[in-house]
Amino acid sequence: LATWAGSEGVLPAYLIGMALAGSVGRDHALIRKIRAVTIGLLTPFYFIRAGYFVSIPAVLAAPLGVAAFLAVEMATKIVSVYPVARRFGSPHKDAMYTTLLMASGLTFGTISALFGLSNNIIDESQYSTLVAAIIATAIVPTMIANSLYLPRHRRPRETAPQRVHSADPAKESVLEG
């Protein structure tokens, strides 16, 4: 289907997944099986192929390009997702957390970049720069979100020190934990 349409092989699977999400999404056992097969068997082949075309020297030669693409991608997500999260009543920290976690463009970004490379729209150095920025969009926003905007319900609970009682008051101690 993908070859006939002149697109990447993973794109029809992506579109079929979106189309079936409503009906198949109710069968949780089936979803777990599909995820196991997809993540364990199919996804590695796609990312090995996508990574095969990345030129490390091209990435190292264009750090400003990677940073610029990363900044543009994050800015567009912040401008588009943050106001919607706030509109739905999320406090600032929760809205930023949601926005930063939604900033990853890993799946569709790599599909688009590989499509551009396969159809000679971009060259290998441009592809390498784009893929490096796409990978950075999965790492950098997640690190920022978890370090600065982690919602209260996601934080580890701190426990108060517990006093161990003894018959002899001199032997009482405090346990941290």
Image: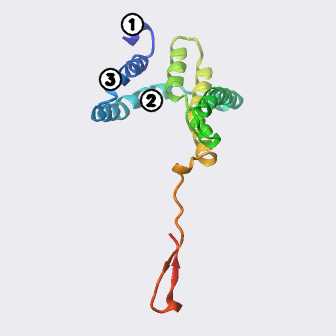
- Tell me the kind of residue under disc 3: Ser
Q: Is residue 28 left or right of residue 120?
A: left
Could you tell me which secondary element the residue under label 1 belongs to? helix
In the picture of the structure, the residue carrying the numbered disc 3 is 23
Q: Are marks 3 and 1 in contact (CB under 8 Å)?
A: no
- The picture places residue 166, in percent across and down from the top left corner, at 46, 87
- Tell me the kind of residue under disc 1: Trp
| Above or below, 111 relative to 89 | above
Distance (Cα) linking label 3 and label 1: 27 Å
In the picture of the structure, the residue carrying the numbered disc 2 is 48
Q: Is residue 13 left or right of residue 131?
A: left
Distance (Cα) linking label 2 and label 1: 23 Å
- Tell me the kind of residue under disc 2: Ile
Q: Earlier in the sequence, mark 3 or mark 1?
A: 1
User: Callout 3: 10 Å neighbours few (<14), some, many (20+)?
Assistant: few
Q: Using the rendered view, name the quadrant where residue 129 is placed.
A: top right
User: Callout 1: 10 Å neighbours few (<14), some, many (20+)?
Assistant: few
Q: Using the rendered view, name the quadrant where residue 29 is placed.
A: top left
Q: Residue 160 got which mark?
A: none
Image quarter (top left, top right, bottom left or bottom right) of the N terminus: top left
Q: Are marks 2 and 1 in contact (CB under 8 Å)?
A: no
Residue under the point 40% across and 28% down: 45
Please state which of the two labelled residues, at mark 2 or mark 3, is closer to the viewer.
Answer: 3
- The picture places residue 66, in percent across and down from the top left corner, at 66, 29
Q: Is residue 54 left or right of residue 8?
A: right
- The picture places residue 11, in percent across and down from the top left corner, at 43, 18
Please state which of the two labelled residues, at mark 2 or mark 1, is closer to the viewer.
Answer: 1
Could you tell me which secondary element the residue under label 2 belongs to? helix
In the picture of the structure, the residue carrying the numbered disc 1 is 4
